[in-house]
Image: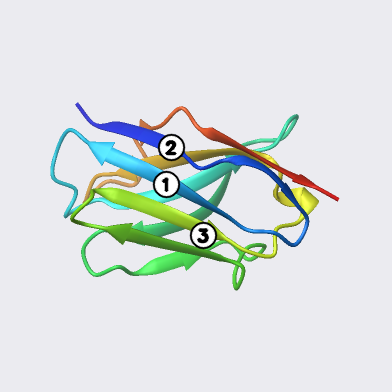
Amino acid sequence: QVQLVESGGGLVQAGGSLRLSCAASGRTFSDYTMGWFRQAPGKEREFVARIMWSGGSTYYTNSVEGRFTISRDGAKNTVYLQMNALKPEDTARYYCAARAGGTFKFNYWGQGTQVTVSS
């Protein structure tokens, strides 16, 4: 059973940084794509970034490109989201997700971690 556990959220001032972690367990993830999504109050969940576990290819939504960096540590089975130059509009609950190779949908989700950016 795949389990994803996020950590690292918190309250930060605009311009500050946070690093989110997602500890993955339950299988080997070498053929998986890992992603970060976020959902702000009253808004739909939106894609933030993704990384292919094998090869490390990354992709970002436009609003975070150049400020956020997604990475993974195979030895620790952990995915990270380094967030710099945070803005109040980055405030949301951030979720880690996993998508099996050959599929098109993120099927596994963590519980999320709250990020609040004050102005």
Q: Is residue 105 visible?
A: no
Residue 84: image x %, image y %?
Answer: 62, 64
Query: How far apart are labels 3 and 2 at the CA level?
Result: 13 Å
The quarter of the picture where residue 2 lies is top left
Label 2 environment density (alpha carbons within 10 Å; few <14, some 14–19, many ≥20): many
Residue 68: image x %, image y %?
Answer: 56, 63
Amino acid type, residue under disc 1 in the picture? Ser
Q: Identify which residue is drawn at 46% across, 38% down.
A: 7
Mark 1 = which residue?
21
Asked if the residue at tag 2 contacts the one at tag 1, i.e. Cβ–Cβ closer than 8 Å, the answer is yes
Mark 3 = which residue?
82
Q: Secondary structure at mark 1?
A: strand
Q: Secondary structure at mark 3?
A: strand
Residue 41: image x %, image y %?
Answer: 73, 31
Amino acid type, residue under disc 2 in the picture? Glu
Q: Is residue 53 above or below residue 108?
A: below
Mark 2 = which residue?
6
Q: Identify which residue is drawn at 54% across, 49% down.
A: 47
Residue 33: image x %, image y %?
Answer: 31, 53
